[in-house]
Image (spheres, rainbow, N blue to C red):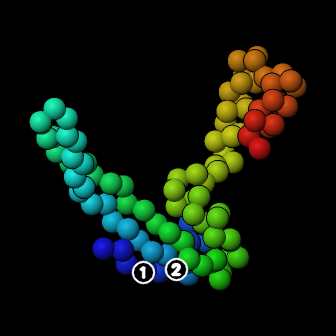
Amino acid sequence: MPENIILECPFCHKKTVNVIYYPSILQASTSRAAGRTVTKYYKTKEKYEVLSDCSNCGKKIKEIQKALEGEKKDPDKEKEIIERLKKQGLFMDEIKQNYKSNKS
């Protein structure tokens, strides 16, 4: 059953974000062919539907939704990748431009 809860903001870590939480459940899928019926069970993923902006840090609903789904950008990881490419001698200006344009 979906429930309305207040979650911690993934950016400022204060309990200010109003969300609807859908827990993971077991669902059945039935297929029928040639007089034979097969029922397979699968588990759905838990899901959050963000209803409000963060009143503390001002992040918008879309940003919070992406962060809860695991798409939060990590600037340290980006820097680490660039440094690794430089050490290997593979990092040129063209690659850097392509990297930034593909990221957008």
Tell whether 13 sits left or right of 73: left
Residues at discs 2 and 1 in contact (Cβ within 8 Å): yes
Question: At x 21% / y 46%, what residue is drawn?
Answer: 30
- Quadrant in the picture for the N terminus: bottom left
Question: At x 56% / y 81%, what residue is drawn?
Answer: 16
Question: At x 76% / y 16%, what residue is drawn?
Answer: 89
Q: In the image, which disc is placed on residue 58? A: none
Whether residue 40 is visible, yes or no, is: no
Tell whether 74 sits left or right of 44: right
- The location of residue 3, given as percent across then percent down, is 37, 78
Identify whether 52 is placed above or below 73: below
Crowding at mark 1 (Cα within 10 Å: few <14, some 14-19, many 20+): some
Q: Which amino acid, by three-letter code, is at mark 2?
A: Asn
- Quadrant in the picture for the C terminus: top right
Q: Which amino acid, by three-letter code, is at mark 1?
A: Asn
Name the image quarter holding residue 85: top right
